[in-house]
Image (cartoon, rainbow, N blue to C red):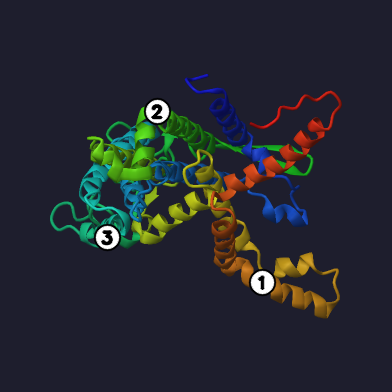
Amino acid sequence: MLGLDKKDTSLLLLVVVLTMAAPFLLNPFPEGSGMAQFNAGYPDLMQRFVIFGIFAIGFNILFGLTGYLSFGHAAFLGVGSYAAMWMFKLFGMNVLPALFLAVVLSGLFAMLIGYISLRRSGIYFSILTLAFAMMSYALAYSVLATDMDGPDQQGLLQKGLTGGETGLQLTLTDPRIFGEASTEDGNIPVPNLFGIEMRAATDLEIGNWVFTFSAGYYFAAVVMLISFYLSIRIFRSPFGMMLRAIKSNQQRLNYTGLNPKPYMLAAFVISGMYAGLAGGLMAAMDPLAGPERMFWTASGEVVLMTILGGVGTLIGPVLGAGAIKYMENILSKINSDILHSWFAFLPDGLEDFVVALIYPFIGKGWHLTLGIIFMLVVIFLPGGLVEGGQRIKRLFGRGKSAEDANKPGKATTPAE
């Protein structure tokens, strides 16, 4: 189906089911219960799952296939956000042109950075990409955010091209040539898809459960599914095989007479375009673009997502992105009062001891939990969460095969 083999088709269908049924799967506990704290089925968080999934999928095309570790992919995320915001400010609030511009500009920016950075490999390549990302952050934070003088002092360029520390925001004075500058009630219009607002949502109440279906989430989910499908095609294509050859032994590839540089640059540009698409979606879901999206910590975050999920795997980066964003938004909100309510059945002294033992690992200390999980994955599961799932599958499959082997009449073939 769609040019994929049976295994890849099954994987794509699995991702489709998981994304489409996310409002149900991420709200397993009824409202008002003590475990409702762990529900993650609200639109803002679900949008982050799929958007950062796109970011990680694109990064995996570069890092997973070629082995080139970039610490500067946040620069393309920021470029995509700023491009989408300027499209909203100048032309209209339709998200499709904004995403198109975000992908194109981030691809061109990636071509420039990749052409220079790929002249080196290993740690030198990583440091070069990090330097470009930090220069991009400095440009967005201060250089391109200088207040303008002259007739446009209170207009579009009041705070430069990027808006500086406060970020680039929509205003009522934006021209929006092909769209309305303001709504009928005088407010700033919101991003939409041919009239369907990204913030539009419908609630479904079933008993004590409340499931929210957001137009913005499902649009971002469809974009993620298309991105995931394209990544499968890239992985299975001759181009993907060439990238694996570069990762395996680039020196030997040079001896065959093949020049790997164009392939690496193409992978870098494609990866940057994925990041720009994710940045454009972030602006479409929440019309704001700030320099913090270009900071080095954002680049490090996508590295963690890819390694945690499984470098070089198809679904691993998506799982890693979901796991980190879940901890960031759910685990970080658990405070001491919630812990005391959970362990109230214990004697007072024991309750305080248990809460004091757990509290450093949740709330503001959720990074400590993430660090421990990441360390354990790197040591015991080098293939990430995907390898963990494969081990569990083999464990159950081994027991089943042993039962089949003990059945009467089962033919055996001697080893040769």
188 or 54, nearer to the observer = 54
Q: Give the percent coordinates (x, y) of residue 271.
A: 36, 42
Give the quadrant of residue 94. top left
Q: In screen coordinates, is 158 left or right of 296? A: left
Q: Earlier in the sequence, mark 3 or mark 1?
A: 3
Residue highlighted by disc 1: 359
The nearer-to-camera label among 3 and 2 is 2
Q: Residues within 10 Å of mark 2 (few under 14, many from 20)?
A: few
Q: Earlier in the sequence, mark 1 or mark 2?
A: 2
Label 3 amino acid? Answer: Ala
Q: Which mark is residue 237?
A: 2
Whether residue 53 is situated above or below residue 364 in the rendered picture: above
Residue in the picture at 86% in, 26% down = 408
Label 1 amino acid? Answer: Tyr
The nearer-to-camera label among 3 and 1 is 3
Q: Which mark is residue 131?
A: 3
